[in-house]
Image (cartoon, grey):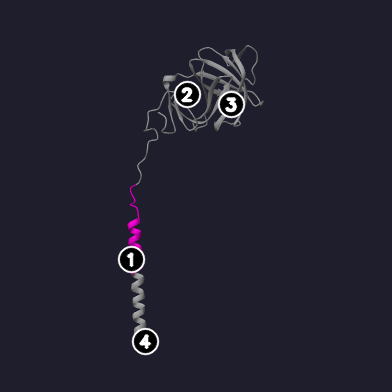
Amino acid sequence: MLAGMTAVVVVLILLVLAAVGVMLYLRARANRKPVDERPGKPVDPLADHQGVTDIRTVRAGDMIDYGDQLYFVRGSLRLTEGGYTWSEHFLDDARGSRMWVSVEEDPDLEVVLWRETEEVTAPGGKSMEVGGVTYRKDEDGTAKYTSEGTTTVAERGSVEYVDYEGPDGKALSFERFDGGKWEAGLGESVALPALRVYPAGSDRT
């Protein structure tokens, strides 16, 4: 008799547990969100826009297409001197080629692509010859700067500069950040119609 009652109790307990398990399973199934098992389609990062030509909007994270080459904007310098402002952007093609592009309005928009050079180490006089090209001094001064992204300089500070002009849009420039050593760059004017900017965010077109 006792054994029979024990068996009945065990069966009832098993039935209760089974019922609870079914209820929990059904509740979890009802709350579960459908999952799309299809793999995501590849997305074109440039599909949202065709690029813009207004390089004044450039900032770190953007891409610049110029001369059949795509460059990543790794960082920017915003410079001010008195009431005058301009920008310099650090470009990297991810294959070892690095350069800078300067953007200023004086009063027309002037865009120059700069490559570092070790042919000269410091400014000297009213004219200088580099690589067979003669450059004549244009201007000099000291500006304040703020840094965004990767630029290899401090977050903010001052920079001395000496600029020289050459023929056919060529240029020579010297910069000295925060009292450090002079850095020289050879520049060439950018043909704006051949330049496209691909903003990193969707808030700019």
Q: Which residue is depicted at the point 33% across and 58% down?
A: 29
What is the three-letter code of the residue carrying label 3?
A: Tyr
Q: Position of residue 133 (x, y in %)?
A: 57, 13
Decide: few, some or many residues near mark 4? Use Cα within 10 Å; few <14, some 14-19, many ≥20.
few
Q: Secondary structure at mark 3?
A: strand
Name the residue carrying label 2: 56
Q: Position of residue 39 (x, y in %)?
A: 35, 46
Q: Earlier in the sequence, mark 1 or mark 4?
A: 4
Q: Earlier in the sequence, mark 1 or mark 2?
A: 1
Name the residue carrying label 4: 2
Q: Which residue is depicted at the point 36% across and 71% down?
A: 17
Decide: few, some or many residues near mark 3? Use Cα within 10 Å; few <14, some 14-19, many ≥20.
many
Give the quadrant of the N terminus. bottom left
Q: Secondary structure at mark 1?
A: helix
Name the residue carrying label 1: 22
Q: Which mark is residue 145?
A: 3
> How far separated are the C-alphas under marks 3 and 1?
67 Å
Total marks in image: 4
Is residue 22 rendered magenta in the image? yes
